[in-house]
Amino acid sequence: MLARRRRVVPARPAPGEVLAETVGLHVRLGHREVLAGIDLSARAGEVLALVGPNGAGKSTLLAALAADLPAASGEIRIGGRPVGDWSAPELALRRGVLPQSAALSFPFPVQDVVRMGRAPWAGTPFADTDEEAVAAAMAATEVAQFAARPFSALSGGERARVALARVLAQRAPLLLLDEPTAALDLRHQELVLRVCRERASAGDAVVVVLHDLGLAAAYADRVAVLHDGRIAAAGAPAEVFEDELLSRVYRQPVEVLPHPRTGAPLVVPVRAAEARGARPAAGRAGPV
């Protein structure tokens, strides 16, 4: 209890402030080097998307930024300090983490699961905002209508939204989200990325792992393309997303076209018929 009372509540970050960064980061899992020499920063007021093929190191990098995986060498900093300088309660005030999957052993009601996100603030001057934070997070993720239902009775997409609501209720200035749209339908994919943009506009830093390059192009301020444990390119989506790079990284020919209305990059795979220059005649069905 004494340690809890001594915790220093983080101040709101200044625009552009670096809230998390890696410097020369190397991470090993067993005998395999999964990340090799990663330099990356997450800044207040921006959405940073981590993209790349399966096995590129995106989730490992996110876990390292969250201080959930140790560095074999290099450094990880949160709030300007090495992650090892923070206690677990102090980290919980500074970063909220959404893993790829959420599992609970007991059938807690949805509202109680979201309320778990407020645990780091117990004993601080902000504890009296718990109910407001929970209600706002549930409304943002559209889960308020099943607040009383057991978490275990939800569909996969509903569970994903409840898990995100828990992280939003935490109200940490750094959000680290691992594939938050993977289980979601079209509407809720857009909703989640709009929430990310809103949090960035409010001054938070958001780092999100995405497989959908269209979502990354539409909503991220910066993207980092990972390939074989390294950053192949980083910058604004319009600068980074180009045919040759993505075709090489994903080992799939693609075309990058500007959206006809917004100009945002659209990444379109080149499929077999197009690569051969053959297209089915209009009104005629192709082979089944």
Image (spheres, rainbow, N blue to C red):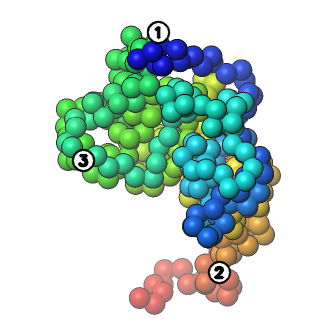
How far apart are labels 2 and 1 at the CA level?
61 Å
How far apart are labels 1 and 3 at the CA level?
31 Å
Return the residue at label 1: 125
Q: Secondary structure at mark 2?
A: helix
Determine the image quadrant of residue 271.
bottom right
- Residue 89 visible, this orientation: yes
Q: Earlier in the sequence, mark 2 or mark 1?
A: 1
| Amino acid tagged 2 | Glu
Q: Residue at x 65, y 75 (%)?
A: 252
Label of residue 105 in the image: 3
Crowd around label 2: few <14 · some 14–19 · many ≥20 (10 Å): few
Q: Is residue 131 left or right of residue 200?
A: left
| Amino acid tagged 1 | Pro
Q: Is residue 196 above or below residue 99?
A: above
Q: Is residue 66 left or right of residue 264?
A: left
How far apart are labels 3 and 2 at the CA level?
49 Å
Label of residue 274 in the image: 2
Q: Residue at x 28, y 46 (%)?
A: 104
Callout 2–callout 1 Cβ contact below 8 Å: no
- Residue 199 visible, this orientation: no
